[in-house]
Amino acid sequence: MHFIQMLYTTMPMSYDLDIWSINPLGDTANALFSDNDFIEKEDHYCLSSKNWQIIVSQSQRIEIEDVPEEIVPIVPGVSYLTTLNLEPLTAPKSAISKVKKIARDLSKSINGIALDKQTDEILGKSNSKIKLLPAEDKRFDILSIKWWITNEFFNERQDFHLLFNTIKKYSIEALPHRYGPYEPPEFKLSDNGLDHLIDYFWTNKTDFIVAYPKKPFVGFSITSDTSYAHQRLGFVSKSVELEVNSKILEVPGWDVNIKRLWREVSNTLNPFYGEVRLLKNFTESRTTYYIDGKSDSHPIRGNRWRGFPESFGLAAVFGSPYAELLNFQSRLHFMDDGDWRLGKTLEFKIDDSFKQKIVDDSIGSEPLYATNWPFEKVEGYKTKEDFTELEANNQSVVKLGVFKKFRDFLIGRK
């Protein structure tokens, strides 16, 4: 997962609306933009004021699986998604009213509806509002299988080839079946083949990639290059994460297969640490999942490694340098308490000096480095104030609307 994604999982940067429509933006929409003094850019339209701006994306053709279930019967034949972003989120009420009116007018011109993503309300074709009915609450737990890496893996295309073929050997469903630079992902594994998938991840390894695996897998992410990481983030590692619906462990044979996948990918990556952890209370979506206040969060914040968490998951693997520091005898030391279906966590106790230090668990805070720290200690932000400064330094990127895509992907707002 791209390092900067983790910054914006819970901090929206803009007021966002989606238009789900039968037709893409065309001449009618262009006339509306002209009336509102929009400026046409390469891939979006922009309306700027002194203290805010509205960005309207070009319409993207979508697959039916991208569409929220509630939208399908409301817009029969829905085929396109157009996004509107009002930046910053603190824009005045008059600007919010304006972006809503523009969304409403655009949706009418291209035969669709506008969805206010802050309130989950559909803005009607007149001035009425129709409350979007919540989907059935389909709760499930996620088996997070994750590795942290500081070695030279991912420095060559062959490394991606090796990893993807290892995953394919045990579960082709875990590979991205759709992938691309933004929502909805434009490429399909079934159309382009495995070589294209490998080439895409290799040539775009410093970029954000939207990737949908095939169910029962619900998440796939790789951070394969950290050379561009902002220094204020502190120490960052490479990482790989596979997420799968834990219910699959009840299907005969899958519990064994998932364990084989875990072991084989561990041997392929040779991480300094990896683990399998059960995270609870997520809600199903068509492509991935939704997160809310009931959902567990991972105790390790993305790839910003600061030390071991307070408690371990269902399984763990320790590689260099921790294998040597903890006096394990093998290159990779595996721990596994048996049947993952029971949800039993490891009882292994590690000295507190190896654990990350949580001093403030609120948004914008950062764990401190463990006392026993074997890597370079890069001083990153530690407080909310530091986080705010880092955010301000990236406003030029925010204005392109890309952080909104990072956030939406991570919180599952498909």
Image (spheres, rainbow, N blue to C red):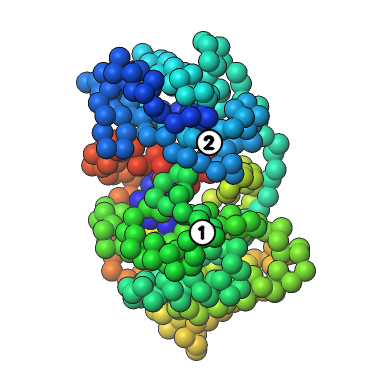
Query: Mark 1: few, some, or many residues within 10 Å (few <14, many ≥20)?
Result: few
Q: Relative to the observer, which residue lies in front, 343 or 255?
A: 255
| Picture residue at 59% right of the left edge, 41% below the top | 64
Q: Amino acid at mark 1?
A: Asp
Q: Is residue 242 above or below residue 94?
A: below
Name the spot of residue 367 as percent of width and height, x first: 40, 54
Name the spot of residue 90 as percent of width and height, x first: 35, 25
Q: Secondary structure at mark 1?
A: helix
| Any part of residue 366 in sight | no
| Picture residue at 37% right of the left edge, 34% below the top | 58
Q: Relative to the observer, which residue lies in front, 285 or 368?
A: 285
The residue singled out by tag 2 in the image is 79
| Any part of residue 329 in sight | yes
Q: Relative to the observer, which residue lies in front, 156 or 72?
A: 72
| Residue 203: quarter of image | bottom left
Outermost residue, top side: 127
| Picture residue at 38% right of the left edge, 47% below the top | 7
Name the spot of residue 193 as percent of width and height, x first: 49, 65
Name the spot of residue 108 as percent of width and height, x first: 49, 18
Q: Secondary structure at mark 2?
A: loop
Q: Amino acid at mark 2?
A: Ser
Q: Is residue 56 above or below residue 266?
A: above
- Image quadrant occupied by the N terminus: bottom left
